[in-house]
Image: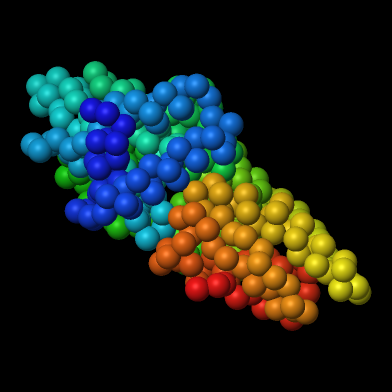
Amino acid sequence: MDFISSLYYLRVVKSIQFSEYRILDITRLLCNDVTMWDYSDRVKDAFLHPKNVGEIKDADAVGEIGSIICGDALKLYLKIDRETGKITDARFQTFGCASAIASSSALTEMVKGKTLDEALTVTNQDIADVLGGLPDQKMHCSVMGREALEAAIANYRGVPVAKKEEGRVVCKCFDVTEEKIRRVAMDNHLTTVEEITNFTKAGGGCGECIPNIETILQNVWSLKPTEKPSKPKKLTNLHKIALIQEIIETEIRPGLQADNGDVELIDIDGSRVIVALRGMCTGCMMAAVTVKGIQAKLRELVSDDITVEALQ
């Protein structure tokens, strides 16, 4: 199957239809994703030549994780020999970036020939290691693979799987629970909010859940509260403009680019900041949340009276 044909499988999880223009647009964005990040050669190869793409019509087990609305989704199909309990085939469909495609491809190759219990020993770090490592901001793709595997095996064994892990939802933007944050933090020895965002996306939207994530991490590791950077007491207009530009470049754009989105600063009029969403952020159902998150970050680090507007 060539690359463009693969995209029709890779980008369709729930019978979503894209126009020819949209498919080409997705191709362009995914290729930009490859050049934007310092991917290993193994990741690039697994993305450009993914293995085991598509569905298994008579699958013995199916595991589905993620949400298209939140930007990543994976559906994993397994064929299992009932006499030996070994996985004889594994295929996938995914909606996501180059890392998501590469991680899914690697996972399906890793579990073939394994018993179910052996497959459950595969960790998200194992997936990343097979690919020669993933950028920190892309580790959530390997976590998604591990969770899809767990869901598929639970499906085969007839174990009920809740739509989301038990516990209160901490990050409403990406529907991440406190239990998931605790589990991922302990499994991967994560100690900062930035690391939690890299592995789960929690905190990467509007930012309102960041204090709660910090509290969870403090409880998990008995950490001392981190000191937040204080806003400058007084700024000239020139300093204010320079600070806004710096924060957008260093604090905001990298997070959006991690999911093939971007933001462009258009104008600054006093405390009014005008931006334009680019890439996958354009027309996204989460665009309003993204703008709110940009505003929250600028209010945190620059001034409480800043408002952010996005060009339509």
In-front residue for pair 167/133 = 133
Q: Position of residue 98 (x, y in %)?
A: 43, 37
Q: Residue at x 38, y 47 (%)?
A: 26
Q: Residue at x 23, y 55 (%)?
A: 17
Q: Would residue 175 be found to the left or right of residue 187 on screen?
A: left
Residue depicted at x 52% and y 58%: 278
Give the vertical position of 116 relative to 168 (above or below).
Answer: above
* Nearer to the camera, 87 or 6: 6
Pinpoint residue 74: horizontal percent, then vertical percent: 32, 44
Residue in the picture at 10% in, 26% down: 82
Judge left or right: residue 300 versus residue 127.
Answer: right
**Residue 291 can be seen in this image:** yes
Q: Is residue 172 above or below residue 40?
A: below
Q: How is the image coloured?
A: rainbow
- The image quadrant of residue 61 is top left
Q: Position of residue 244 (x, y in %)?
A: 76, 64
Q: Quadrant of residue 58?
A: top left
Q: Quadrant of the N terminus?
A: top left
Q: Residue furthest front?
A: 21
Image height of 257 relative to 290, above or below: above
Residue 237 drawn at (x, y percent): 86, 73
Q: Which of these two is toward me, 104 or 98?
A: 98
